[in-house]
Image (cartoon, rainbow, N blue to C red):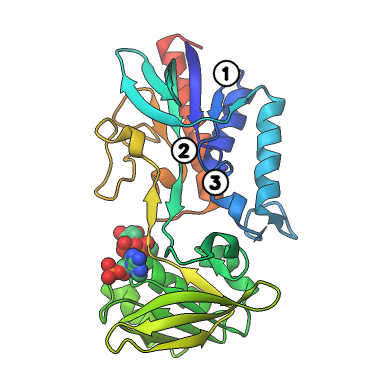
Amino acid sequence: MEKMIIVGTGCAGLTSAIYAARANFSPLVLEGHEPGGQLSTTTLVENFPGFKEGIEGPELIMNMKAQAERFGARFQYAAVTDFEPQKDFLRVKIDDQWVDTRTLIVASGASARWLGLPGEKGLVGHGLTSCATCDGAFYRNVPVCVVGGGDSACEEASFLTRFASKVYLIHRRDTLRASKIMADRALANPKIEPLWDTAPVEYLTDETGEMRALKIRSLKTGETRDLEVKCVFVAIGHVPNTRPFVGKLDMDENGYLLQRKGTQTNVPGVFAAGDVADHVYRQAITAAGQGCAAALDAERYLADLGAE
Ligand code: NAP
């Protein structure tokens, strides 16, 4: 019987692992399909407190992992494939093997939804990103574009006007899905130019492999043209990684885990932290904070069980 299994090794899972390991729980930490989470695919992180010159996302993750290992966290390259709550304990299927545990911290994150255009994966960090807060400041006085029509797209487009010379907002329809206040704010900004009924078709790169332009197509006329932009910000939603828990843990209509008291889910002993339960803030530091809270909640739960 494990005392604590932590699912995910992004900021939330690793912070849980540091706290739980330091409290001597020797947690089993599962790396999942995207070890390191979203930070492992970003470049310089300038807004994580404590690094005045910034820190590379992968380095931050490696440091957190080493910190958790130093206190006795055990890491396994495996993913949760199924989950069955029992009375007083939890049964978790890790790859194809069932393991029992007293507590489970789900910090499996959310994955950005991408457009699915050719070459997309290799361009992330080279003029293609899904996070304006992370990467916007790198694109000063150059044109950029945001793809999407929801609150995220509007928020990111507005944020990017602080840096970029021009922000194209590319949407596949002629009305935004975003809330009125966010849409009005974006459309009133003179630096934002909406391109309605438009779909991205192809990423175009320069000789160094960085983004040069986005080929777009009018869905009304079929006409294509190259939009000169140095960065494409994709904001077409995120998908929380909650599949093994469907029907067992309470989720909202988009699949994000619901927390009841603190980080506790509807199943006793199961706690949720980070982007898997947060579609609002989505920051490394807020995920880390929740990871800490989940570990403390799990420790208290174990103490109440008398299973410390
Ligand atoms: P969203 O509301 O699901 O919007 C996604 C947008 O991307 C939609 O406009 C959609 O177009 C478009 N889209 C989806 N797939 C596409 C594709 N393959 N190609 C082109 N366009 C595509 O996602 P979100 O904006 O990330 O927001 C998620 C949730 O977080 C929402 O509940 C939102 O209110 C909330 N949120 C709140 C705030 C805030 O209040 N500060 C900020 C950000 C997000 P269609 O409209 O045609 O479907």
Q: Residue at x 59, y 54 (%)?
A: 41
Q: Is residue 57 above or below residue 171?
A: above
Task: Report whether 214 appears left or right of 208.
Answer: left
Checking the image for residue 188, the label placed there is none
To which residue does mark 1 refer?
Answer: 25
Would you say the residues marked 2 and 3 are in contact, meaning their CB atoms lie under 8 Å apart? no
Answer with the quarter of the image where residue 246 lies. Answer: top left
To which residue does mark 2 refer?
Answer: 107
Which of labels 1 and 2 is toward the front? 2
Answer with the quarter of the image where residue 194 lies. Answer: bottom left
* Cα separation between marks 1 and 2: 17 Å
Extreme residue toward the right, this view: 53
Q: Residue at x 28, y 76 (%)?
A: 176
Which percent across, then down, holds residue 257?
A: 34, 41
Would you say the residues marked 1 and 3 are in contact, meaning their CB atoms lie under 8 Å apart? no
Which percent across, then down, holds residue 150?
A: 33, 69
User: In the rendered structure, which amino acid carries the disc numbered 1?
Assistant: Phe
To which residue does mark 3 refer?
Answer: 37
Q: Earlier in the sequence, mark 1 or mark 3?
A: 1
User: In the rendered structure, which amino acid carries the disc numbered 2?
Assistant: Ala
Neighbour tally class for label 3: few under 14, some 14-19, many 20 plus, Cα within 10 Å: many
Q: Earlier in the sequence, mark 2 or mark 3?
A: 3
Neighbour tally class for label 1: few under 14, some 14-19, many 20 plus, Cα within 10 Å: many
Would you say the residues marked 1 and 2 are in contact, meaning their CB atoms lie under 8 Å apart? no
Task: Report whether 249 appears left or right of 28.
Answer: left
Q: Residue at x 42, y 82 (%)?
A: 216
User: In the rendered structure, which amino acid carries the disc numbered 3?
Assistant: Gly
